[in-house]
Amino acid sequence: MNAPKPPPVGSKFLLGAAAFVIVVAGLRAAQSIIIPTLLSAFLAILCAPIVVFLARRKVPTVAAVLLVVLLVMAMLAGVGTILGGSVNGFTEAIPRYQSRMNGLIETSGAWLAAKGVRVSALNLGDIADPGQFMGVIGKTLGGLVAALSNTFLVLLTLVFILLEAAGFPAKLNAIAADGDAALERYSGMMAQVQQYLFIKTVLSLVTGILVGVWLAILGVDFPVLWGLIAFLLNYVPNLGSIIAAIPAVLLALVQLGVGYSVAAAAGYLVVNVAIGNVIEPQLLGRRLGLSTLVVFLSLVFWGWVWGPVGMLLSVPLTMIVKIMLEHTQDLRWIAILLDSPAAVATGPSAPLSAPAPGAHPGRGDSGATSPSRDT
């Protein structure tokens, strides 16, 4: 009896494309549920090491989870208070900034006319309106506040994820044919994801603090707001730092003048170059990077699917998908396509097959030791 012929390549492509469209449509339709769940998952990945640390100190799992959730609640409450107050204050001050901007434009127009430069009849005030420059930032912050407004669902999901995380390795070992190898792949993948999110969060926090302190020294209004925006948008490499700098530099120009605006821009440049181009590659390694084109396309795609919050989550989501793809034999080629040119130049990572003789079991590519099966 003849074996059945495999489907043609064209048919497989069309089926895959149709399945992709259906999945994307489902992601957009379930946005109100998926976004809080994703936020809970990110928080769980960041908080899991704390729960493990407390469990090793003989703290009961339930008590450790409750302590972590209380800490997260306090942090979210603080961020919400700062964000809400700063955004409201800036919104109330926009008319005052608009008046100063109009005066600056009139002065610039008179100076150009004195130099013999003809000024277009176009209303430059509409182009340089601070409200327009704050449009993208305002929508992003509004979407984030809306996502965090359903705090109860986020925290409840976080509790269940943390409680289930301890028993997941045993479940994986029970359902997988190669239990030890599957557990090793899972441990290595989780170690890399935790490493990426933790280091990225710490560096983003340092970026926000440095930016806020520098703007406060210069005397720019609402430095805490601009520091918070720098913290959030630092998750988006390259483009995020530019978007975060625009409103603060513009405000420095309107409020304090050209010299302070240049100083604010220089501060952003120094902080982002030092952290993004020097410190971050040293801590994360070049292999935990994405192509600039992939970053831009992920911004466009996730922003279209989930709006401003999707843009904030786009790079962490893409990085997690890349790490997961690296831990599969048949889809590692997609992870290589997502890599940055520097990572490809250093050569592909070792195949994710059985560990070589003498290799340390449970150790991922990042060098982070994963928890043993007894834990």
Image (cartoon, rainbow, N blue to C red):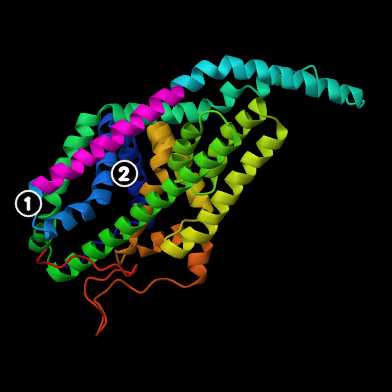
Say if 81 sits above or below 271 in the image. above
Relative to residue 100, is residue 282 depicted above or below? below
How would you rate the neighbour count of disc 1 (Cα within 10 Å): few for under 14, some for 14-19, many for 20 or more?
few
Vertical placement of residue 339 versus 271, above or below = below
* Amino acid type of the residue tagged 2 in the rendering: Ala
Circle 1: residue type: Pro
Disc 2, SS = helix
Which one is nearer the viewer's eye here, 268 or 36?
A: 268
* Residue placed under numbered mark 2 in the picture: 19
- Residue at 22 percent of width and 55 percent of height: 49
Locate the C terminus by quadrant.
bottom left
Q: Give coordinates of residue 200: x percent, y percent.
A: 40, 52
The disc label shown at residue 60, or none: 1
Asked if residue 178 can be seen in this view, the reply is no
* Residue plotted at (26% across, 59% down): 190
The image quadrant where one finds the N terminus is bottom left
323 vs 262, left or right, is left
For residue 183, say whether it is visible. yes
Q: Which residues are magenta?
A: 63-87
N-terminal-most mark, 2 or 1: 2
- Between 321 and 200, the one lying in front of the other is 200
